[in-house]
Image (tube, rainbow, N blue to C red):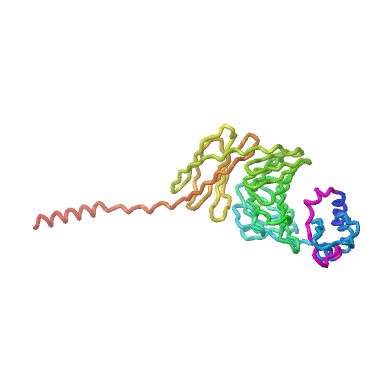
């Protein structure tokens, strides 16, 4: 019943507003509204009348092959598909939507829609979806997989995440059709994309920040939408519209000095930078290992043997983090020490040789 109440509300929206929540179906030979509803709708009995009204069809019995039909996505049969945890560091808790006790997740586990993931201080996780989109969940974050589903007879997934607090980095696989959507909701805004790389964060004051690395993101809040292109960012304070997009600060020019025990990084400071944000990752699986906020243009960290990636970003006065500066490096094992020669043995060899020469 709730589906049809939602459908009734949808009928009152303008065509432009409804289009973003509609599936575009092209009628085939032999199709009728009844057949379309039987094939795709969750509740087909009354669907054909509502479908005719939704498409402003004067005669619902007169439709032709090739005609475009708008079907509200909320009406469709859907197939829930799980996401997968591909890397975990530290304490990452899963709160099942189906109930039951919270548990600490391990790499390889699946996450159903409705489940919540919480990362403790110093913890992180990398989440992978069926379309190869990825989300890195930073320390101190609470993320809910609101919806992750694929509609029957469609290729596109609909992904909706809710970031209640903390930071995430999204790498969204480009959409091959209009059926695939990827949205991140926060307490103060919503970000919708169709293939991009971008960051979303929610601070203690529930201010939402979006920084776009590649592609574009539509950020909406309080009835205002901002089109944020690559290389720009915006923020939305709670109960306020997002600000006009501003350019990201330039990527720092980072130089590394690596030993067998640690790594040191240095970069020229920027006049517009209030601070610098650093993250270091394990190369093989992209797992976030640590992060730091610095005022100066240098950093040092002890690390075990391994292959790493360092990310450095300048941060402006609004807390928006700038362009990425990535550097790969490796901590190599220290060389084996050369055994010391026994000086006493060398002396005896010398004396023996000298005695042999005197005897000749």
User: With 169 as the anchor, is 36 left or right in this view?
Assistant: right
Instruction: Pick out the residue farthest to the right.
Output: 59
Between 227 and 80, the one lying in front of the other is 227
Look at the image and tell me whether residue 120 can be seen: no
Per the image, is 16 magenta?
yes
| Residue 138 spot, x, y in % from top left | 63, 48
Q: Quadrant of residue 3?
A: bottom right
Instruction: Pick out the residue farthest to the bottom.
Output: 30
Which residue is found at the position 23% from the left and 55% from the top? 345
Quadrant containing the N terminus is bottom right
Q: What are the residue bounds of the magenta stretch?
A: 13-34
Question: In the displayed structure, would residue 162 be above or below residue 84?
Answer: above
| Residue 234 spot, x, y in % from top left | 68, 40
Between 115 and 95, the one lying in front of the other is 115
Which residue is found at the position 49% from the left and 53% from the top? 306
User: With 351 as the anchor, is 245 left or right in this view?
Assistant: right
Which residue is found at the position 69% from the left and 51% from the top? 194
Quadrant containing the C terminus is bottom left
Instruction: Pick out the residue farthest to the left.
Output: 360
Look at the image and tell me whether residue 82 can be seen: yes
| Residue 281 spot, x, y in % from top left | 55, 50
User: With 128 as the anchor, is 266 left or right in this view?
Assistant: left
Q: Quadrant of residue 55?
A: bottom right
Which residue is found at the position 57% from the left and 47% from the top? 290
């Amino acid at each position: 019943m709730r589906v049809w109440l939602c459908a009734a509300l949808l009928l009152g929206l303008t065509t432009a507003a409804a289009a973003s929540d509609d599936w575009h179906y092209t009628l085939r030979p032999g199709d009728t509204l009844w057949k379309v509803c039987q094939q795709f709708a969750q509740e087909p009995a009354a669907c054909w009348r509502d479908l005719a009204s939704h498409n402003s069809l004067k005669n619902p019995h007169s439709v032709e092959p090739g005609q475009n039909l708008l079907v509200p996505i909320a009406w469709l049969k859907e197939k829930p598909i799980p996401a997968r945890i591909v890397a975990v560091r530290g304490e990452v808790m899963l709160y099942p939507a189906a109930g039951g006790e919270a548990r600490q997740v391990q790499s390889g586990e699946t996450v159903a829609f409705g489940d919540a993931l919480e990362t403790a201080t110093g913890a992180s996780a990398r989440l992978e979806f069926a379309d190869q989109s990825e989300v890195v969940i930073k320390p101190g974050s609470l993320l809910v997989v609101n919806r992750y589903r694929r509609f029957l007879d469609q290729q596109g997934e609909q992904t909706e995440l809710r970031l209640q607090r903390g930071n995430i980095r999204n790498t969204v696989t480009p959409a091959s059709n209009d059926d695939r959507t990827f949205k991140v909701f926060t307490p103060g805004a919503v970000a919708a994309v169709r293939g991009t790389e971008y960051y979303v964060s929610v601070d203690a004051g529930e201010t939402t920040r979006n920084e776009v690395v590649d592609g574009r993101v539509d950020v909406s809040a309080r009835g205002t939408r901002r089109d944020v292109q690559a290389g720009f960012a915006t923020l939305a304070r709670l109960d306020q519209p997002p600000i006009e997009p501003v350019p990201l600060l330039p990527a720092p020019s980072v130089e590394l000095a690596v030993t067998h025990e640690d790594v040191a990084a240095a970069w020229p400071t920027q006049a517009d930078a209030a601070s610098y944000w650093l993250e270091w990752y394990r190369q093989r699986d992209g797992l976030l290992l640590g992060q730091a906020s610095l005022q100066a243009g240098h950093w040092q960290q002890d690390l075990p043997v391994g292959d790493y990636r360092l990310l450095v970003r300048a941060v402006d006065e609004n807390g928006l983090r700038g362009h990425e500066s990535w550097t790969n490096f490796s901590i190599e094992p220290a060389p084996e020490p050369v055994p010391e020669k026994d000086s006493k043995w060398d002396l005896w060899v010398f004396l023996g040789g000298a005695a042999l020469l005197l005897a000749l």
